[in-house]
Amino acid sequence: MRRRGEACLSGDDGVDRVALVATILLAAATVATAWSGYQASRWGGEATKATMKGNAARIESTRASSLANAQAQVDVAVFTQWVDAYARDETRLRDFYFERFRAEFKPAVVAWIATKPIENANAPLTPFAMPQYKSAARDEAARLEAQADTWAAISRRNIQRSTNYVLGVVLFAAALFFAGMSTKLPARGLRIALLTIGAVVFLGTLAWIASSPVSISV
């Protein structure tokens, strides 16, 4: 007569339940390993895309900043000539330079003149200190720089997600190892012990991976 412990481990048809559970675990862990590897690859690709977009935004930001600096140099050069004519009250020459101010710079100059800088000691030293002085190129550079920082943060996040899935692959591989070894040992107690370890590793990893974001390419 079979002992009760053996009856729990073997079905009525003589099929070893330990081997059956091990087979199921092997199949599930194999699928989970493949899924984790796919997700690790997907998130690695997403991280690369984000990095490329961030680099492109940073390059454009540098270009916009260079343009803003060049425009500022032009503003300074023309203003230097204009203020000299303004101080000497050379109306014709002053108007000549004024007409050559950039459209963004003129409002600042007008607002600065309204402060009567020659008579008013509290007036701003130059139009460049006026709130009316705007630079669309510099604003664009700042916007693109912020955009680049955002893409960099997205890239770091996606790299972390890819790394998590790689760890999932390792843990699922460990579950595969324990499940596979459980079918090789002759001692039923050791087989059950290894199978139990494999199942715990598999289920714990599965619960963790199931809560991770998914990236799908259609």
Image (cartoon, rainbow, N blue to C red):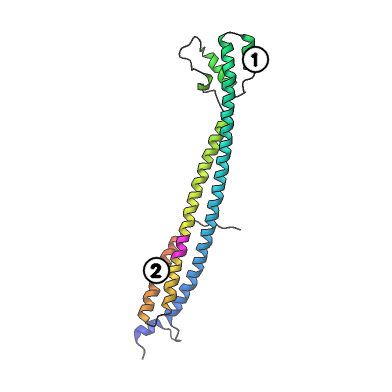
3D distance between C-alphas at marks 1 and 2: 84 Å
Disc on res. 55: none
The residue that mark 2 highlights is: 200
Give the mark toward the camera: 1 or 2: 1
Type of amino acid under label 1: Phe
Type of amino acid under label 2: Val
The residue that mark 1 highlights is: 96
Q: Residue furthest bottom?
A: 1
Residue at the location (55% across, 44% down)?
55
Give the percent coordinates (x, y) of residue 96.
65, 14
User: Is 168 part of what is drawn in magenta?
Assistant: yes
Q: Could you tell me which quadrant the N terminus lies in?
A: bottom left
Residue at the location (40% across, 80% down)?
185
Give the percent coordinates (x, y) of residue 19.
44, 79
Graded by Cα atoms within 10 Å as few (under 14), some (14 to 19) or many (20 or more), the crowding at tag 2 reads few
Visible in this render: residue 108?
A: yes
Quadrant assignment, res 217: bottom right
Up-down relation of residue 103 to residue 28 (above or below): above
Residue at the location (45% across, 71% down)?
176
Up-down relation of residue 154 to residue 3 (above or below): above
User: Is 128 part of what is drawn in magenta?
Assistant: no
Please tell me which of labels 1 and 2 falls first in the chain.
1
**What kind of element bears circle 2?**
helix
Q: Relative to the observer, which residue lies in front, 196 or 58?
A: 58
Write the start and end of the magenta stretch as one range.
166-170
Residue at the location (56% across, 14% down)?
83
111 relative position to 200: left or right: right
